[in-house]
Image (tube, helix red, strand yellow):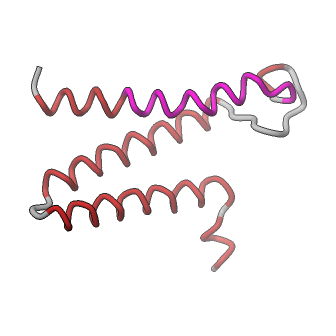
């Protein structure tokens, strides 16, 4: 198995593990629409999982690309921090419209 394929597999597995947290919270929320409730609390639908899964996967792949392309350790750290920060900004905008409210 090549190193690039292993990195891809680890990124996909990491994305899946991170998505287990909202899945458990949605399944244990008695008010979630998935459990027959009226909504409210932690209530993710299929589209939420798809969007967040795609975002996490892209952030992970971009971070790996940044590490591979950057030459010095300092540049690598800065590049990964920039990728993660960008992911957080996109997530915040999708979740509650943080950037839209500021403009």
> Closest to the observer: 52 or 63?
63
> Which region is colored magenta?
13-31
Residue 12 in picture, x, y percent from top left: 36, 30
Residue 102, above or below 40:
below
Residue 78, above or below 38:
below
- Image-quadrant location for residue 74: bottom left
Magenta-highlighted stretch: main secondary structure? helix
Furthest toward the right, the residue is 38
Residue 71, above or below 68:
below
Residue 22 in picture, x, y percent from top left: 63, 33
- Image-quadrant location for residue 78: bottom left
Residue 52 located left or right of residue 43: left
Tell me, yes or no, whether the highlighted magenta stretch contains residue 17.
yes
Residue at the spot 15% in from the left edge and 33% down from the top edge: 4
Residue 40 located left or right of residue 12: right
Residue at the spot 24% in from the left edge and 47% down from the top edge: 64
Residue 90 in picture, x, y percent from top left: 51, 58
Residue 80 in picture, x, y percent from top left: 30, 58
Furthest toward the bottom, the residue is 103
Tell me, yes or no, whether the highlighted magenta stretch contains residue 45.
no
Residue at the spot 80% in from the left edge and 28% down from the top edge: 29
- Counting labels gives 0
Residue at the spot 13% in from the left edge and 56% down from the top edge: 69
Furthest toward the front, the residue is 73
């Amino acid at each position: 198995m090549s190193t690039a394929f292993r990195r891809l597999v680890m990124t996909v597995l990491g994305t899946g593990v991170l998505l287990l947290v909202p899945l458990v919270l949605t399944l244990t929320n008695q008010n979630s629409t998935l459990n027959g409730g009226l909504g409210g609390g932690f209530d993710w639908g299929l589209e939420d999982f798809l969007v967040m899964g795609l975002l996490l996967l892209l952030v992970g792949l971009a971070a790996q690309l940044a590490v591979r392309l950057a030459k010095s350790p300092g540049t690598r750290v800065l590049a990964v921090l920039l990728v993660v920060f960008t992911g957080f900004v996109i997530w915040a905008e999708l979740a509650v419209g943080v950037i839209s409210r500021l403009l």
